[in-house]
Image (cartoon, rainbow, N blue to C red):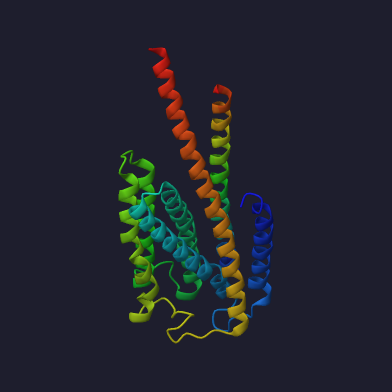
């Protein structure tokens, strides 16, 4: 992975650049909302990427609870952290899109509120990881991750089962989309997924090496304390 | 158009800020690894 990383990074940068070009130039202008609708090409792929990362966090947390594998724990942490970054993008771009279209920045609509709750759950997960020094922290975090992941389907299906201010889904649920818009959406989703994959791998690698360094430092301290006696 | 640009700029500002945080942590880790190597 280390050798392929620069190549993958260049390919991802090219895909992101093309995604930006396609979103701003190639995609047709939506009739009702006009150009502001192009926020869709960043808002929706960011939400899907965040959901994927939270799902990865759930799988890694379950693996950790079953096998107590520290690498699964490190992967869960990396996925949650990058997922929070993407969820932050969703929560920032949503109100910027809502203001010119709905006339308001925010409303306590079910989809919006559940997305905010999802973000808060994973921020709490990261706070727990950051500030708890207990040896049981990874176990507590894995359990929290399982409960947190329950909010993901609630966020996704909230607009299927309840009447909300948020538009209907573009996949299933009776929603329809221009094929050119669909193509641009898919390009951006692929671009953001590749970007998230690379960032998540970097964060995972950082976590694994950090833990190794911490263990070595602890061992060094013990050896120093032993030799000074 | 200003809302569109604001959304795109905000997206990249968030990602760049996070990448900056990761780079800072990598730099700190590299310093720690070098310190450990010197000790050994």
Q: In this picture, is B36 found above or below A31?
A: above
The foreground one among B39 and A102 is B39
Which residue is most to the front? A67
Q: In this picture, is A45 found above or below A85?
A: below
The foreground one among A50 and A34 is A50
Q: In this picture, is B7 found above or below A168?
A: above
Asked if residue A97 lies left or right of residue A16, the reply is left
Picture quarter with the C terminus of chain A: top left
Tell me residue A52's x, y (percent). 47, 65
At a point 42% along the width and 84% down the height, the residue shown is A173
At a point 60% along the width and 65% down the height, the residue shown is A191
Tell me residue A188's x, y (percent). 59, 69
Tell me residue B3's x, y (percent). 56, 67
Tell me residue A43's x, y (percent). 52, 68
The foreground one among A4 and A122 is A4
Q: In this picture, is A45 found above or below A143?
A: below
At a point 64% along the width and 80% down the height, the residue shown is A28
């Amino acid at each position: 992975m280390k050798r392929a990383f620069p190549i993958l990074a260049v390919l991802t940068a090219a895909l992101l650049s093309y995604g930006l070009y396609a979103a701003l130039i190639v995609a047709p202008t939506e009739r009702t909302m006009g150009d502001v609708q192009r926020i869709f090409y960043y808002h929706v792929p960011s939400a899907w990427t965040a959901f994927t990362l939270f799902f990865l966090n759930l799988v890694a947390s379950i693996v950790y609870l079953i096998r107590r594998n520290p690498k699964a724990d490190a992967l869960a942490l990396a996925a949650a952290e990058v997922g929070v970054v993407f969820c932050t993008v969703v929560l920032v771009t949503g109100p910027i899109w809502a203001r010119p279209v709905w006339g308001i920045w925010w409303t306590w609509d079910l989809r919006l509120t559940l997305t905010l709750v999802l973000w808060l759950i994973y921020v709490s997960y990261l706070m727990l990881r950051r500030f708890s020094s207990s040896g049981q922290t990874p176990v507590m975090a894995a359990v929290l991750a399982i409960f947190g992941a329950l909010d993901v389907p609630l966020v996704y299906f909230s607009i299927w089962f309840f009447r909300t201010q948020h538009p209907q889904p573009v996949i299933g649920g009776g929603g329809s989309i221009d094929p050119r818009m669909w193509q641009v959406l898919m390009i951006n989703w692929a671009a953001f997924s590749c970007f998230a994959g690379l960032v998540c791998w970097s964060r995972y690698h950082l976590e694994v090496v950090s833990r190794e360094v911490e263990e070595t430092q602890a061992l060094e301290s013990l050896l120093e304390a032993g030799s000074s006696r | 158009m200003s809302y569109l640009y604001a959304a795109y700029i905000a997206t990249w500002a968030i990602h760049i800020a996070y990448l900056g945080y990761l780079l800072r942590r990598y730099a700190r880790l590299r310093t720690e690894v070098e310190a450990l190597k010197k000790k050994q």
